[in-house]
Image (cartoon, helix red, strand yellow):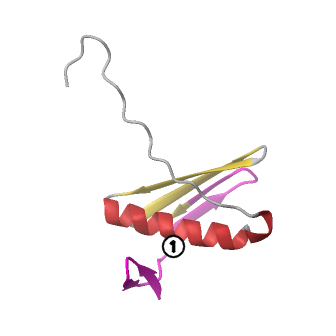
Amino acid sequence: MLRHAGRALARPEIQHVEWSDTHGTLDLGWGRCTMQAGPGMLTVRAEAADEESLQQAQDLITRNLERFGRREHLKLNWQRPEAPTAQAGETG
């Protein structure tokens, strides 16, 4: 069992996986992870339908990538994409 915010969670069921030498996608049904490898960098994107599922996906990805990258001292730093700004003359 996994734990999130002090609660026990069922292990995620992987729905679909695709990968190449530089790109990977993991679909968990309730969340999705996309990874893109570049020179000296791994970009990871987590997506989910709601905030709780997004946090679960980020926790799962962080735990596993940091465990796999322990020798390289891999650490994830999640950032939210910047919200688009309104162009001059636009109303929101």
Report x, y in % for residue 61.
55, 66
In the picture provided, is 83 more to the left or to the right than 28? left
Q: In terms of image quadrants, where is residue 75?
A: bottom right
Q: Pointer 1: what residue?
A: 14
Above or below, 71 against 9 in this view is above
In the picture provided, is 2 more to the left or to the right than 87? right
Instruction: Count all numbered tags in the image, as a single digit.
Output: 1
- Type of the residue with mark 1: Ile
Residue, x 52% and y 71% (percent of image)? 60
> Is 67 contained in the magenta span?
no
Instruction: Rate crowding at label 1 as few (under 14), some (14 to 19) or many (20 or more) other CA atoms within 10 Å.
Output: few
Label 1 sits on a secondary structure element that is: loop
Report x, y in % for residue 81.
44, 41
Q: Point out the stretch of residues depicted in magenta.
A: 1-25
Report x, y in % for residue 92.
20, 25
In the picture provided, is 14 more to the left or to the right than 83? right
> Is 9 contained in the magenta span?
yes
Above or below, 21 against 14 in this view is above
